[in-house]
Image (cartoon, helix red, strand yellow):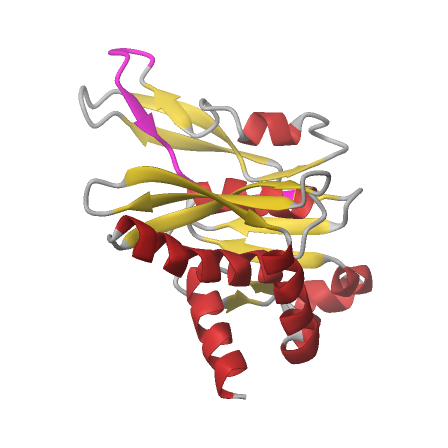
Amino acid sequence: MSEKINKMIICPKCSEKSEAELICSMNNKSFPDMKKIIFGDKFFEWQCPKCGFQSKLLHPLLYNDMEKRFMVYYIPDAKRKIIADEKLEKEFSELSHIKKRLVSDVNEFREKIAILDAGADDMAVELAKYAVERIVEKSANKKVMSGYFLDMDKSENTISFHFFVGNENRPYIQTTRLEVYNRSVGIVKEYFEGFDKQSGFIKIDREWAKEAWKIYKNS
């Protein structure tokens, strides 16, 4: 995959045509500060050079952490649960030993990077988040609309999540004991250990956690 491409953009406000450089792939070697870049507010922002109109320019992006051996592929609004490239897997056999994830939302993209960068098991994090989500719904007496991993503090024995509840998307931070995550690690090892042996980029998100929880409970 090319690291960068040039794309012609037509401003929705003034109809001015301009060329924008899009980063399609980044790794530690080419982008030493890639985590800082992705978590910056301006990465997906675009501004018309003529009228100054600002908009988000969302596009596929492959994030490759070669040191911590994980890849996160962001494809806007991707519906598939797995994207496999058999030719690529055969050509680069070492990819089978790298954790590969697929995400379809910018917030999920940043969350997945934060989880894997922290050295955590993202399957276990999603299961723990799903369990905590139900506690939050009972406590807030409102439906959780979305939720994200916030922090894992081993010294304090805690894991924290940032939820958004109700139709107004009110922020709600919930911290719980790390035991919830550790228990989820055990569930992953017992029931889903072979899941990561599939080729391709796999979507591990809230929907996956919901289905995985059903499998665990019905086993």
Camera sees residue 137? yes
Q: Residue at x 56, y 64 (%)?
A: 202
Camera sees residue 1? no
The image position of residue 11, as x and y in percent, is: 25, 25
Q: In this view, does 23 lie above or below 141?
A: above
Q: Closest to the observer: 78 or 68?
A: 68
Quarter containing the C terminus: bottom right
Q: Closest to the observer: 36 or 3?
A: 36
**Magenta-colored span:** 49-63
The image position of residue 41, as x and y in percent, is: 45, 24
Q: Residue at x 69, y 74 (%)?
A: 193
Please indicate whether residue 152 sits to the left or right of residue 175 in the image.
Answer: right
Residue that protrudes farthest toward the bottom in the picture:
219
Q: Closest to the observer: 39 or 179?
A: 179
Please indicate whether residue 7 sits to the left or right of residue 32 in the image.
Answer: left
Q: In this view, does 111 lie above or below 128?
A: above
Task: Examine the structure image and report whether residue 53 is included in the region drawn in magenta.
Answer: yes
Q: Which residue is drawn at 78% across and 62% down?
A: 97
Q: Closest to the observer: 169 or 6?
A: 169
Main secondary structure type of the part rendered in magenta: loop
Quarter occupied by residue 52: top left
The image position of residue 16, as x and y in percent, is: 25, 20
Quarter occupied by residue 185: bottom right
